[in-house]
Image (cartoon, rainbow, N blue to C red):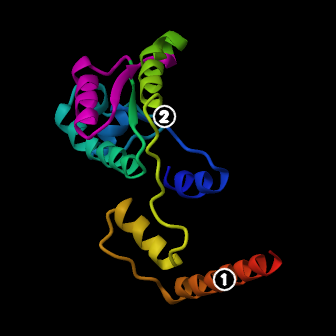
Amino acid sequence: MEKFFNIKCRYSGLKPHVVVLVATVRALKMHGGGPTVTAGTPLPKEYIEENLALLEAGCSNMRKQVENAQLFGVPVVVAVNAFNIDTKAELDLICKLAKAAGAFDAVHCSHWAAGGTGAVDLARAVQKAADLPSSFKFLYDIELPIVDKIRIIAQKIYGADDIELLPEAQHKVDLYSKQENHFWSILVAQW
């Protein structure tokens, strides 16, 4: 999302109106410290039995993703893909925590099983969010030095205190900065 917003949208002129963040009970339980899932083996009981504490611990990841989207001024709709082993209490907890984190809405979805009818509530929520006036903004000013852009992304998106560049990375930053300055000087001279 960060790269799409800061790079693709900047150069294409796209202005997103809504972020759809997809969540599942299983993925959030994994983020909460659940055991490893291995292909070809039965799911551990933590994923097939209700476990609200594990789920709530994993919702910290979802909360950070909602916060990240809000840094760009874009409302978030959380699409909670509901599977047959998920309980209503688990699905409701995700929706409650998503809204508490600042999501515009959070809805249960079952389109994997019910087709389009399983995503009607999601479509309505996305439409309502998209109808709001766009407050989309970039995370950093394009004119900032490369190191400052990296620092802003590291601090705001990833929660870093600061950045430290290894000599090889610093060399590349210096090289790219010179190339960027050269590009702009040629462009200005042609005008």
User: What is the span of residues highlighted in magenta in the rendered image?
Assistant: 84-112
- Residue at coordinates 36% horizontally, 23% vertically from top-left? 107
Q: Does residue 118 appear in the picture of this structure?
A: yes
Q: Identify the residue position indicated by label 1 in the image.
A: 181
Q: Indicate left or right for 79 with 45 as reference.
A: right
Left or right: where 28 falls relative to 139: left
Instruction: Report x, y in % for residue 41.
Output: 43, 34
Q: Is 187 placed above or below 8 here?
A: below
> Where is residue 181, by image quadrant?
bottom right
Residue type pointed to by label 1: Asn
| Residue 82 visible to the viewer | no
Is residue 3 shown left or right of residue 54?
Answer: right
Which disc is residue 97 wearing?
none
Q: Mark 2 points at which residue?
A: 40
Q: Quadrant of residue 47?
A: top left
Element under label 2? loop
Give the residue displayed 80% in from the left and 74% down from the top: 191
- Find out whether residue 168 is within the magenta segment: no
Q: Which residue lies furthest to the left in this view?
A: 53
Q: Which residue is drawn at 47% across and 47% down?
A: 136
- Tell me the element at label 1: helix
